Amino acid sequence: MKADLPTNDSALTAYTQYSSDRRKGALAKPDLVISRKMVLLSAVLLLIIGLVTWLLVSYAQQKVVEYHAQKLALVIARQAGSARSVYATEVVEKLRRDGFGAAADYHTRPGMVPLPAQFLKLVGRRSSIDSGELYSWRPLSKWNLAQDQGLQDDFQRWGWAALEAQAAGHRPDDPVNWQPVWRVEKVGGVSTLRALHADPAAAESCVNCHNALEQTPNILARRLAAGLTPGRVWRINELMGALEVQIPLSQIEALTQAQSRTTLTLIVGMVLAALMILGWFFVINLSRARSMAGELQWRAAHDSLTELPNRTEFERRLEGFAALAKLQRSEHGLLFLDLDQFKIVNDTCGHG
């Protein structure tokens, strides 16, 4: 044997250490990869759960906000209609029976009061001021009787066309099941629900009054200027006007966003706690699996009685020494021991 080459004892020690490190590395590397994958998967899962939860909660709360805003707009529109009806039946009719009544130029005529449409506009202005910016409403019409009651922006034109479409196909004098139209848009930089409620001709007195006004010179001129056919003759239940209700959503949206953040924080916290518990169980099970794998590996390579390496382990080590001999250009010796008639010892004394 060459002097500069390791001895068989040193070669055996080196190989044993090499074999042990290789087995440990083989076990540690998959565990490390699995641990990294679990951490990454948990982080991705937490991110997905948080994002989906935020989207679902935000969407649900936005729909709830819009639903209640629509209901509030409907209440405001119905209250406005009720106020005008009471005014027309109880005030205007009483004055008419007393020899007075309602007129468009009531300012200059003693004993006369505003027309129901004018009264509605006045109430809308005052209600919008007194509401403290909680809501606002106003009457408007494609067939406006005052310059400030016409269709002035895209929403009003879109909403009026949508209401007209609801009346399409109905016979004259047939009631229409009017449904409000609405959408959420920015008004002065504030997210606002804008709803348009139909205000049809509800009484013969209303129809007669408007038909008379349609024949006046200033209204005829206004219809021509707007590209409308002058001299319109109204019938009962036709779309004569509408009420636009605006409800700012900024305050309630800020409240719902705060609730969303609280809900999301709680959900993410619970999910994170659950993942930590799962991770703890995973680490414990992994440690047990490592211990069990090491024990099974040792048992597979050793005799249970003598705790000596078995034939499978012998062959593995033999292959390792042969490979090491080629790698280090070294030589190894194999000692073979054979005890004759050892069966008699086992038979008489037992294996133990």
Image (spheres, grey):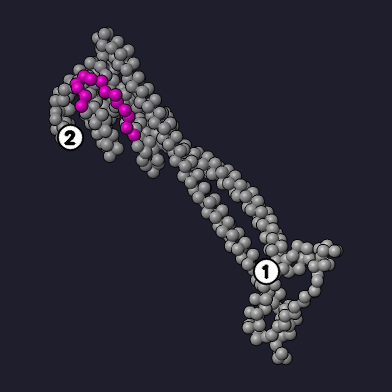
- Mark 2 and mark 1 in contact (Cβ < 8 Å)? no
The structure residue drawn at horizontal position 51% and vertical position 41%, both measured from the top left corner, is: 260
Task: Between residue 160 and residue 169, name the one nearer to us.
Answer: 169
Mark 1: give few (<14), some (14-19) or many (20+) Cα within 10 Å: few
Q: Is residue 105 left or right of residue 245?
A: left
- How far across and how far down the image is residue 108, in percent? 24, 20
Magenta residues: mostly which secondary structure? loop
Mark 2: give few (<14), some (14-19) or many (20+) Cα within 10 Å: few
The structure residue drawn at horizontal position 26% and vertical position 19%, both measured from the top left corner, is: 202
In the rendered view, would you say 344 is above or below 275?
below
Q: Residue furthest top?
A: 98
Query: Quarter of the image holding residue 81?
Result: top left
The structure residue drawn at horizontal position 19% and vertical position 21%, both measured from the top left corner, is: 172
Task: Name the residue beneath numbered marker 2.
Answer: 226
Specify start and end residues of the magenta stretch as a single range. Answer: 169-182
Task: Name the residue beneath numbered marker 1.
Answer: 312
